[in-house]
Image (spheres, rainbow, N blue to C red):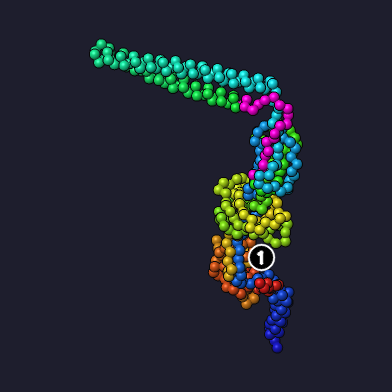
Amino acid sequence: MTRRTRSILVATGLAALLGMYALLRAGGGLEVDTERVGRDSLRVTVNEEGRTRTRDRYAVAAPTHGRLSRIALREGDAVNAGAPVARIFPLPEGTRELVAKRALIDAAEARQREATARVTDAEARTEQLRREVTRSQRLADAGALSAQALERDALAVESATRQLEAARAALRAADADVAVARAALMGATPQRAGGQPVVVTAPIAGRIFRVLERSERVVPAGTPLIEIGDARGLEVVVEVLSEDAVRVAAGNDVLIEEWGGSEALRGRVQRVEPDAFTKLSALGVEEQRVNVIVDLLDTPPSLGTGFRVEARIVTWQGSDVLTVPVSALFQLDGSWRAFVVANGRAALRTVGVGHRAVQHAEVLEGLVAGDEVIVFPSDAVTPGARVTTRRASVR
């Protein structure tokens, strides 16, 4: 054996040893995590936080001024429709108040008499001017009066007629003032505090949500006293981003979670409000949001108004859909791509993607059921690279 031949054999042996060492060190290729493409149900949702509120909430106000007696009802108490919830006693009328009210009547009646006199004068003047214009018309027909004088007499009649209408309107206003002043005095007699109270009743059957005026005090008419609502008619207000709101429609199914119970509650979108509003996110970023109103189909007795919940609004769902993990997809040259493991090597595929959920997406083309795709592929994964799977998920 020559020296040259011996050198070639040594070099070949060293190369073989180095190749075996590299293969053993690499473990047969780059280790990757994979999942299989398969058919499954897919549900696309918009997930946002929401709060419960009553569908019909009534604020009961004082119908008249007076002294409100202490309200004994408490938040959470049940009331029937027409049940008394508050009592308002009339304030006592003193001699001074009665004298003032009678003086108002006297003043109103004086203005009424004045307005009546003005109407009488205006009627007499208008009638006189009408007779004069009749005589002027005869003289003008006979040629004894100029057309200018006849026109002046006609204008005087029109002016007097308008003044008569104004006087009659003033009389009607004076009549109304007299009626108001007399109504204020009606039934007002000197009395002590107390008397027959005005009973305020519940407009619907429900529960007391808030007692706004609990203590006894004098309240003016229109003062809110309590708030009543029907706890069985709960709805959820969900604030969604405006770009997500365009995908939500009335009638969409909704799953209500994180409300405190072990199972999700069912709901349905009642309406999407058309007016968006600006809200700061937790990171201080301005966001355009829209209120989505959801009717609760399941209302447990323990759920009340103002409770925080998590709402999952279903915008699309399918029962037999070819799906791929979203973690296996990435964008390249404007198209969705995925790496498929074939014969121990990574193969790049272009994937047509349809509906996308949080974890899985609908496959329209490029993949078939049973394909093993690499999830979370790193930059080390390249087309044709030898790979070995650490685990294969079975769905």
The residue closer to the viewer here, 343 or 198, is: 198
x, y (%) of residue 388? 68, 74
For the N terminus, the quadrant is: bottom right
The residue closer to the viewer here, 6 or 12, is: 12
x, y (%) of residue 64? 65, 33
The residue closer to the viewer here, 302 or 247, is: 302
Q: Which residues are magenta?
A: 184-203
Q: Is residue 294 left or right of residue 154?
A: right
As drawn, the residue found furthest toward the left would be: 142
User: Is 8 one of the magenta-colored residues?
Assistant: no
The residue closer to the viewer here, 344 or 163, is: 163
Tell me which amino acid carries mark 1.
Answer: Phe
Our reading of the magenta stretch's main secondary structure is loop
Q: Is residue 50 left or right of residue 138?
A: right
Q: Which residue is disc 1 drawn over?
A: 376
User: Is 190 one of the magenta-colored residues?
Assistant: yes
